[in-house]
Amino acid sequence: MRDEDKQIIRRLGLFQDMDAARFDGLLNAAFLQRFPERVVLINEGEPSDFLHIVIDGMVELYATLDGRESTMTVLSPVSTFILAAVLKDAVYLMSARTRTAARVLMIPAKSVRDAMAEDDAFARSIVDELANCYRGVVRNQKNLKLRTSVERLASYLAHQYVRQGATGELTLQIDKKTLASMLGMTPENLSRSFSTLRRAGVEVNGPEITVRSLDELREIAHHAPLIDNFPNTVEHQQ
């Protein structure tokens, strides 16, 4: 593993306070692999053998039932998954596959559990990480249950607009079918929702989206601080 990759992982909240020797031990036990697009990394129902960290590329978490499939979320660098299953030594509740070519670090689950038992700082960071994940789940559930499809799309575009620098444009990082699934709607509903947002100055050209006003998007979404989680840096740039 390159030194810059180690430094990136070290800066993750999960690892930044743990003992240096134990951190090195985790990485020495880990496997860094390159995967092409559309490779299944884990299957729901299988034992959680590794904690995964997305170093490069994008990874989709999804679930299936009776032939139906739904995207749960799409992860970008640098992100970990699925910590809770690793700590409980339980099966995965979601599957994961690469959306693009990706580099993924895989840390053996037992090594993670052993480090947690031996390193109090690491254990506290794990509690903090799980708390953040839980709050993220609550925010997502409120978004799905309290907003209409148009409002959910407006909220998603507003978040992406801010994260990509609020320059007047944004690029969809995932295809529209996956986006619809993640937002809890059909592709047809997504298309109608984009049409509705034209009144707010949203213009669509393939994956390229032009945004007239962040404030208009947030107004349509009924922006709520107890649901939305905007980055702190460029929230009001236009």
Image: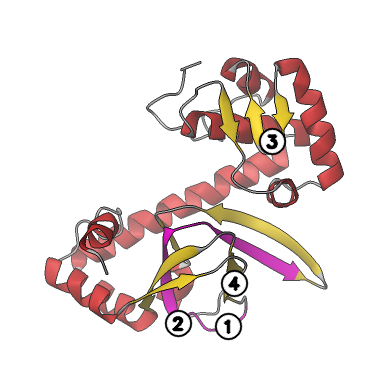
Mark 4 or mark 1: name the one nearer the start of the chain: 4
In the drawing, what numbered circle is on residue 46? 1
The residue that appears at 59% across and 54% down in the rendered structure is 73
Q: Nearer the viewer, residue 16 or 29?
A: 29
Q: Magenta stretch containing residue 52, yes or no?
A: yes
- The label on residue 152 is 3
Query: Residue 15: x percent and y percent?
Result: 26, 60
- Kindly state the secondary structure of the residue where label 3 is placed: helix
In the rendered structure, find residue 49 and report the number of the disc placed on it. 2
N-term mark: 3 or 2:
2
Location of residue 29 in the rendering, given as x and y in whole percent from the top left corner = 28, 81
Q: CA distance from mark 3 to mark 4?
A: 29 Å
Q: Secondary structure at mark 4?
A: loop
Q: Are marks 2 and 1 in contact (CB under 8 Å)?
A: yes
Q: Closer to the camera: disc 3 or disc 4?
A: 4
Q: Earlier in the sequence, mark 3 or mark 4?
A: 4
Above-or-below relation of 80 to 175: below
Q: Which mark is residue 39?
A: 4
The span shown in magenta is: 45-64
Residue 112 shown left or right of residue 90 in the figure: left
Q: Residues within 10 Å of mark 4 (few under 14, many from 20)?
A: some
User: Which residue is pictured at 73% across the width and 45% down the height?
Assistant: 176
Q: Viewer-proximal residue, 156 or 144? A: 156
Q: Identify the residue at image location x=82%, y=73%.
A: 66
